Amino acid sequence: MGVVGLSVTSSTVVRAFDHELVTQAGVIAVVAVVAVVVSVAMARRGPVRDVAPEPRARRVVRVGFGIIWLLDGVLQAQSAMPLGMISQVVQPASSSSPTWVQHLVNLTATMWDLHPVRVPASAVWIQVGLGIWLLGARRGVWSRMAGWSSLAWGLFVWVFGEAFGGLFAPGLSWLTGAPGGVLFYCAAGVLVALPERCWESARLGRVLLATLGGFFVAMAVLQAWPGRGYWRGAGPHGPGTLLGTVRAMTTTAQPGALRSLVAGFAAVDAAHGWAVNLVVVVALGVIGAMLVRARPPGLRLAVVAGVLVCLADWVLIQDMGFWGGVGTDPNSMVPTALLLVTGYLAATATATATRPVEAPASARHLTQGASGSRAASLAALAMLVVGTVPALAAAADPQASPILARAGGATVDAVDAPSPWPGWPGDGGSGGSGPTVVTFLGNCDARGDLATLRAAQRDLAARGDAVHVTVATSCPAASGGLPRRWVTRLTPVALARWRAAFATLSVTAAHSRGDVFYVLAPDGQVCDAMATGAAPVSASLVSSNAVVLAGAVNRVALGL
């Protein structure tokens, strides 16, 4: 995976990505205005049913994870995301997982690589939409739908983006993010989606804290397990697992003060790796046991200690998770801390009534009642639709976006000139009525243009005999895999003469360091010259070049 040869900050792709976001933002803005108008009109019809104040614990988990989803959406809009997400985030996350996990992750990685504008923009709006939905829909069906939607998208990201949070990879550790930060988003989605009667007693909070406690104990056992490299700092056998991870974090682009903190912790772990791991194991085990016990005297202490340990890990080991230009989220510690606080508030809250009461719509602010939830939900749904529809279209399209070819230096020049010499081997030689594609292979190692032709072969073959292809070469063995009728053998001298003659038709073709294709009309008129650029060949780039070539052929066939 990964688009080889293209800079992750390619100006061509970044401009297209920004334009896509701006265009979609305009559509969303119009829908949001309509949603507000509709909600206001419905609120003025008369009294609506309202409920008692939202339980504090539910508000914390809803607002907290709404803000996190918003942050994730903003991070997805970084300029390095279209071309850097797969190679710098997804691939490293799945590289040490079993083959079946890598194949599963590659399904979406391939889609992202082939469509580096539509798919990243979709991720932005889906996550921003989830954040706004959670923040705006305070109660009722709309709010619960936001929770279920958060769960669904979170599971998708956890499987295809985080490779199951590394559960099947060696070196799994709570310190570095196991079992995946997005899995905690899923837990929050379930909490928001629960019927509101579940928040009326302390039972939900106790169950949540006990579950987190069991998780902490399990992670303590895993952290203490010998032979995994966490008991070792710096030594003759190389750095320990944790030390290697923290040192890698110091190379990330980030504020100098934060880098100093992380580097300082790396120095401590290098000198006292065994002691650092012992502190972590004991802290996780004790906090987990206290949470499982869930008794008031020690409950507050356990939650406070858990939050502090999470924050220390978030800064010193996870490096806050979102620096470097391709950070997608704040990792797992902030979500864990939010769930701890939610559990404590729910476990210590007094019973509250949630029976509906009558309240005139004019007496409330829209954002405090059903109308506000409806407006926010409709706007969020618009974002989800704007994000989901292009992503589904991309999933159904196996061909790469032409933007990759342009980013790789591919150009199409309008030539509109007669063929250099009448009667040349591809000049209407087939006697057909369709366009002709001509390219030249000078040696047996020229693979780039063959790869492009092979990728375009399906589109060209779909036109039947209406499109003719001439691959002029002095080494027919180099044209393996192409239909034999496409290959025309020339002597090296004749090949050089024809290539030089055609190169005079286009300045771009004459100076191109990549492959060049000429598209001719049925009468032999040279219409277009396409140069693929000199970027290294990759599957995504080859597919994109093929799309551009097929587009040039279609234009000539239609007489455009």
Image (cartoon, helix red, strand yellow):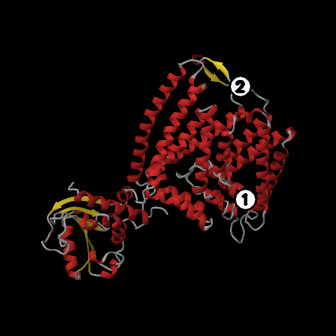
In this rendering, is residue 392 above or below 194?
Answer: below
What residue do we see at 59% from left, 34% from top?
Answer: 142
Q: Position of residue 352 (x, y in %)?
A: 76, 28
Q: Position of residue 11 (x, y in %)?
A: 39, 52
What residue do we see at 33% from left, 69% from top?
Answer: 453
Q: Position of residue 308 (x, y in %)?
A: 74, 44
How packed is label 2: few (under 14 Cα within 10 Å), some, or many (20 or more)?
Answer: few
Image mark for residue 323: none
What residue do we see at 49% from left, 46% from top?
Answer: 388
Q: Position of residue 22 (x, y in %)?
A: 42, 41
Sequence order check: which comes first, mark 1 or mark 2?
A: 1
Q: Which residue is mark 2?
A: 355
Q: Amino acid at mark 2?
A: Arg
In the displayed image of the protein, which residue is found farthest to the front? 464
Quadrant where the C terminus lies?
bottom left
Q: Amino acid at mark 1?
A: Asp
In terms of secondary structure, where does tag 2 sit? loop
Q: Which residue is mark 1?
A: 269
Horizontal side of residue 153 vs 111, given as left or right: right
Q: CA distance from mark 1 to mark 2?
A: 54 Å
Quadrant in the picture for residue 550: bottom left
